[in-house]
Amino acid sequence: MTRKELNLAIFEGKADKVLWQPRLETWIHHHRANGTLPDRYKDLDYFGIYDALGASVRYAASAGIESYTDPNDVEYRSEQYEDHYIVITKTPSGEIRTVYRDIWEDGKLKNRRIADFPVKTPQELKVIIDLVNRQQFRANQEAFKNAADAVGHRAEPTIFLSSSGFTELIKNHCGLLHTYYLLHDHQSVVEEYLEACDRRDDRMIDAALQLPCKIFNLGDHATNEFTPPPILKRYLIPRWQRISDRLHKHGRFVHTHWDGNSALMLPYLLETRLDGVEALTPEPMGDMTLEQIKDAVKDKMVVLDLIRAIDFLPNFPMSEMLEFTKRIIDMFAPKLILGISDEISQVGEIEKVEAVSELVDKICGLAD
């Protein structure tokens, strides 16, 4: 069985093996850019490194859905300064500005993060509503085929859909505090925005269903802090149920991304009707145990990842990481796509990734 075949079989409930699918993009990019790839990987391309590890690839084939707006309706412009970067977005409803803090090293941009969010008032949120309402989507069959062909036998393609409107409000538009200030003081406007996001989801899924893609991800980044149970129940669970039901009618699978502290949300997982959950982070990196996660998913949901990213740091013993990984496999297989919650960092030890490959091969054999 190939890694691609096993990837899909796990979601179909037909698998009897574990798929090892770590996200190595950040690690590979960092070490290639800095000339620090180990000798055994220096002459290998991106996919060659995965093949050397006997590992599957999660998102290399996420292509085929194009987003666009009418340039006559939405105008973007930017201003670059020494240590910050400003993006100005203008729609018929008004103008907003996002200020990013830039970190430079030896003349290269190393990091860019939002320093000042664009939305603090209901009127500024109206600009985001206008922007969301104007977003359109189309399927690009050629882009999907090219990406899927490049990945080949290594994985069943997985395509990103939208994050939830609520977590996008936190991550991109308002920040955590101002999201909750707006919700408290101007609930009707926030809910108008969320309804616009729901309609955008539908337009995006219209395009997605034109592609022969079987697995989709909702990059929600749900956490206790972002989406505690009252928010989860009112705004996110109905969205997940609606999206799941629609995709299931067409024989597709969908999972969400929960990273960070998620213990308060775990009891609601099965209510979502999603097929899986990605990046749950066990303690001490997160706030939940493997036993709590297993109690939440039962034998009904696919769990993606579960090995903590901190386990790959030099100060964490190899033996403890391997013992923890064996516990994960024993508890969650075959509804398991083993990976790192959610990526190995630049300073993570690739030797530990190699050791997990050997462990999986010993337990059930690595897929081809």
Image: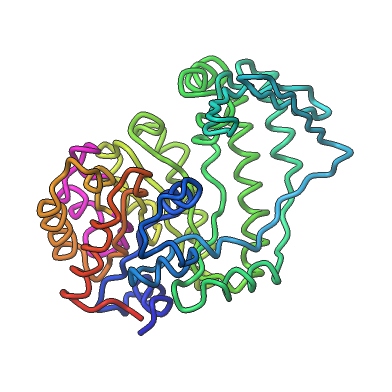
Q: With respect to residue 88, does 280 lie above or below?
A: below
Residue projecting furthest to the bottom:
1
Look at 85% across and 36% down and name the residue there.
73
Say which quadrant the C terminus sits in.
Answer: bottom left
Q: Position of residue 86 (x, y in %)?
A: 69, 23
Asked whether residue 130 is drawn in magenta, I would say: no
Q: Nearer the viewer, residue 359 or 297?
A: 359
Q: Nearer the viewer, residue 191 or 104?
A: 104
Say which quadrant the N terminus sits in.
Answer: bottom left
Look at 39% across and 72% down and name the residue there.
51
Look at 76% across and 42% down and name the residue there.
134
Q: Position of residue 348 (x, y in %)?
A: 30, 47
Relative horizontal placement of residue 342, taking residue 161 as reference (left or right):
left
Relative horizontal placement of residue 361, taking residue 79 as reference (left or right):
left
Q: With respect to residue 334, does 138 lie above or below?
A: above
Residue projecting furthest to the right:
72
Q: Position of residue 126 (x, y in %)?
A: 70, 25
Instruction: Indicate the quadrant where residue 62 lies.
Output: bottom right
Look at 22% across and 37% down and name the residue there.
287
Q: How many marks?
A: 0
Q: Position of residue 203 (x, y in %)?
A: 68, 54
Magenta region, residue range: 281-305
Asked whether residue 293 is drawn in magenta, I would say: yes
Q: With respect to residue 219, does 300 lie above or below?
A: below
Q: With respect to residue 169, does 341 lie above or below?
A: below
Q: How is the image coloured?
A: rainbow
Instruction: Indicate the quadrant where residue 283 lies.
Output: top left
Q: Nearer the viewer, residue 115 or 227?
A: 115
